[in-house]
Amino acid sequence: MKILIVGGGGREHAICWKLAKSPRKPRLFCAPGNAGTGQLATNVNIPAHDIGALLDFARAERIDLTIVGPEEPLCAGIVDRFAAAGLRIFGPTAAAARLEGDKAFAKQLMREAGVPTAEARIFGPTAQEIAQTRQAGKGRDEAASASFQTGYDMARHYVATRDEGIVVKASGLAKGKGVFVHPEPYAALETLERLMVKRELGDAGMRVVIEEMLIGQEVSVLALVDGNNIYVLEAACDHKRLGEQDTGPNTGGMGAFSPTTALTENDLEIIEKDVFVPVIDALRRDEIIYQGVLYAGLIMTAAGPKVLEFNCRFGDPETQPILMRLQGDLLEAVEATIDGRLDQIELQWDRRAAVCVVMASGGYPGEYKKGYEITGLAEASALPDVQAFHSGTSLADEKVVTAGGRVLGVTGIADTIQHARERAYAATRLISFKGAYFRGDIAMQASNR
Ligand code: AMP
Ligand code: GLY
């Protein structure tokens, strides 16, 4: 069996690593992959967004199954294109992936479905309105038409009426850089200007969601969804902020751990019943069948769990600790999802805890340099119960070098969160590259409880 994994980050390395353990011994290809996936799979030099080239490759190579990691190709319709060509693929269609790609759409759907979520208002033109203005032959600036100007004015006006913390979100895809948390609401005015007037995030920020700032522990709950059945995976926590004690800018995630101490079995059942079920049902009423991973980012507030966002894929770095704990066959779970028989599988989980510490390039999430040699990987991987998953790495003259913002996801597994942390941090101490930065407090709070 030949499997193509689309993407090239820590998530994709973890997926390759887990698939490589499948008793079915699949032959793996990863596009574009990284130095880590290259040890388990044949890396294919096609970027994850080049759907046409991926399709050609899958046809020519007679790929039996494609698994998509990142959101861009999903939102751009890779699943629709592969399915239309008769190729087997794991992930939601473009219509279903809108849950991630269009935050305003997700918010409206949650409202209609009665899913608990932060109170929010939506401002600015829809993607359709922007496209229509363009089609009418008008330039980018004219796309900022009446509806846009009104949206911006109304957003400013709304912000001026708030006296508690608010969060401004670019409605479109922004690679994790489209969310701005403002404990002081007036500071949101500058964000509105940057998004809606200066258009620092392009079209993605012309429409914004402004929501109440929620307080509580944040959790990531991922589920496999086969169109009908929902299989909730073990929960994880991600550390989104760059700095220790959750300070500094938001990033793609600086570390993660699983299980989380913030959730009980009962909470997970509530989340399945009040979040996953109504959202999948609401989509189905619109004739959208969700298939793939659905990831709910939630805050456990005093009033119960509330959804911050949906992602239409595995999380990165949550997937690293989650797959370290999965004992069953990932390939079997993926196939059961595609075939609509998730109700017939039972996955086994390692009861131990896994902690992933992300080692990043100095400067990330802003500008950073690439190409620095990484040493100590073999020593780190030789430690028991440790995996150094690669994110932004590549090979240069047979040496592993840095090639991205998040470079490695060093993951340890042990009987307690505390011990798993110690394992992961012991491994990070063996690894070095110029400018390496990582947080020293990943999973620290959870291990004190
Ligand atoms: P998102 O991409 O929507 O997950 O947002 C990125 C991060 O911003 C989240 O992981 C939270 O830490 C934070 N955030 C988003 N929305 C809210 C909210 N309504 N209240 C508090 N924090 C939020
Ligand atoms: N770790 C957050 C995400 O994958 O979006």
Image (cartoon, grey):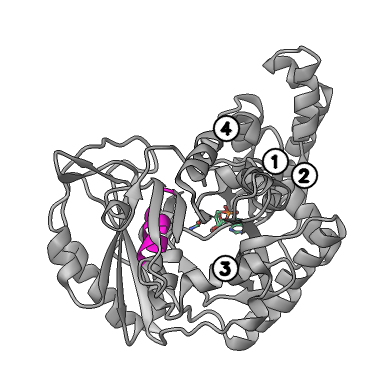
Q: For mark 1, what is the residue?
A: 208
Q: For mark 3, what is the residue?
A: 335
- Residue drawn at point x = 39 percent, y = 68 percent: 18
Mark number, residue 201: 4
Ligand 1 within 8 Å of disc 2? The answer is: no
Give percent across and percent down for residue 220.
55, 67
Q: For mark 2, what is the residue?
A: 122
Give percent across and percent down for residue 323.
42, 71
| Marker count (numbered) | 4
Ligand 1 within 8 Å of disc 1? The answer is: no
- Type of residue at label 1? Val
Give percent across and percent down for residue 305.
66, 73
Report if residue 16 lies within the magenta region: yes
- Type of residue at label 2? Ile
Give percent across and percent down for residue 255.
38, 62
Distance between the Cα atoms at labels 2 and 1?
A: 6 Å
Q: Earlier in the sequence, mark 2 or mark 4?
A: 2
Ligand 2 within 8 Å of disc 3? The answer is: no
Q: Earlier in the sequence, mark 4 or mark 1?
A: 4
Single out the mark in the foreground, 3 or 4.
3
Residue bounds of the magenta highlight: 7-17
Distance between the Cα atoms at labels 1 and 3?
A: 37 Å
- Residue drawn at point x = 80 percent, y = 59 percent: 283
Identify the secondary structure beneath mark 3. Answer: helix
